[in-house]
């Protein structure tokens, strides 16, 4: 999705809203199972162009507890400002460059500028993903003995400490530890 924000950028106090409705197949190898929808707000002080907004989507994630694939709803917010450079660069088209003096912002050269939103949205979606993805808050994970995914039902393993052979072994080990 491309936006021409040059008119906003050069008008101090200007403000616009845009609907975002995009489809990404994937972000960093993760499948998006819903479109990316939300709002973008652009405003200008004449010196700085500020882009803010939020989008919602859904990303396929691997549960960190059980390894199952599930769909994670994602609400991603973004805010980015660009320093507007008032001088046109002769012979060169509109562009955005890194600002070496203020690495946090980027230079916005006046002219007809089509801002490509993809990268901004991809980054904000990545940042909004949970650090430890869980398919459910109470995900039971895997059986430590057979590796069965416990959210799919109980496995045939006996309950913890229920194996009499293990209990005998445990007792032997403890007795050995007590011996001098
Ligand atoms: Zn899980
Ligand atoms: Zn088991």
Image: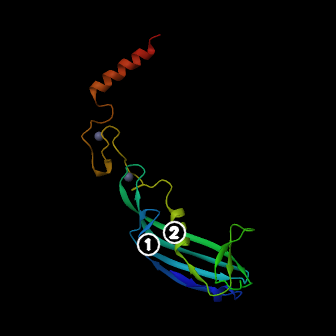
Of 179 and 6, which appears nearest the observer?
6
Of 88 and 74, which appears nearest the observer?
88
In the picture, measured across the screen, residue 28 lies left or right of residue 97, that is: left
Q: State the separation of the CA atoms marked 2 and 1.
A: 9 Å
Task: Give the image quarter of residue 93.
Answer: bottom right
User: Residue 109's spot in the image, x, y percent?
Assistant: 68, 81
Please name the residue shown 32% across and 42% down the image. 147
- 10 is higher (above) or lower (below) than 148: below
- 108 is higher (above) or lower (below) than 65: below
In the picture, measured across the screen, residue 135 lies left or right of residue 131, that is: left
- 37 is higher (above) or lower (below) than 125: below
Residue that sits furthest to the top in the current view: 180
Please name the residue shown 27% across and 35% down the image. 158
Mark carried by residue 24: 1
Task: Give the image quarter of residue 87.
Answer: bottom right
How many C-alpha atoms fall within 10 Å of the one at disc 1: few (<14), some, or many (≥20)?
Answer: some
- 46 is higher (above) or lower (below) than 62: below
Residue that sits furthest to the front in the current view: 91
């Amino acid at each position: 999705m491309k936006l021409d924000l040059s008119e906003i950028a050069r008008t101090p106090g200007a403000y616009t809203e845009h609907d975002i409705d995009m489809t990404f197949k994937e972000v960093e190898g993760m499948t998006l199972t819903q479109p990316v929808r939300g709002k973008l707000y652009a405003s200008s002080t004449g010196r700085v162009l500020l882009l803010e907004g939020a989008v919602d989507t859904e990303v396929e994630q691997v549960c960190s507890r059980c390894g199952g694939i599930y769909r994670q709803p994602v609400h991603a917010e973004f805010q980015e400002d660009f320093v507007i450079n008032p001088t046109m660069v002769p012979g060169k088209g509109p562009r955005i460059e890194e600002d070496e003096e203020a690495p946090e912002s980027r230079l916005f050269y006046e002219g007809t500028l089509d801002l490509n939103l993809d990268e901004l949205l991809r980054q904000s979606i990545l940042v909004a993903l949970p650090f430890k993805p869980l398919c459910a808050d109470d995900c039971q994970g895997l059986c430590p003995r057979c590796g069965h995914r416990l959210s799919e039902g109980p496995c045939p393993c006996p309950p913890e400490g229920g194996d009499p052979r293990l209990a005998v072994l445990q007792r032997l080990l403890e007795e050995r530890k007590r011996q001098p």
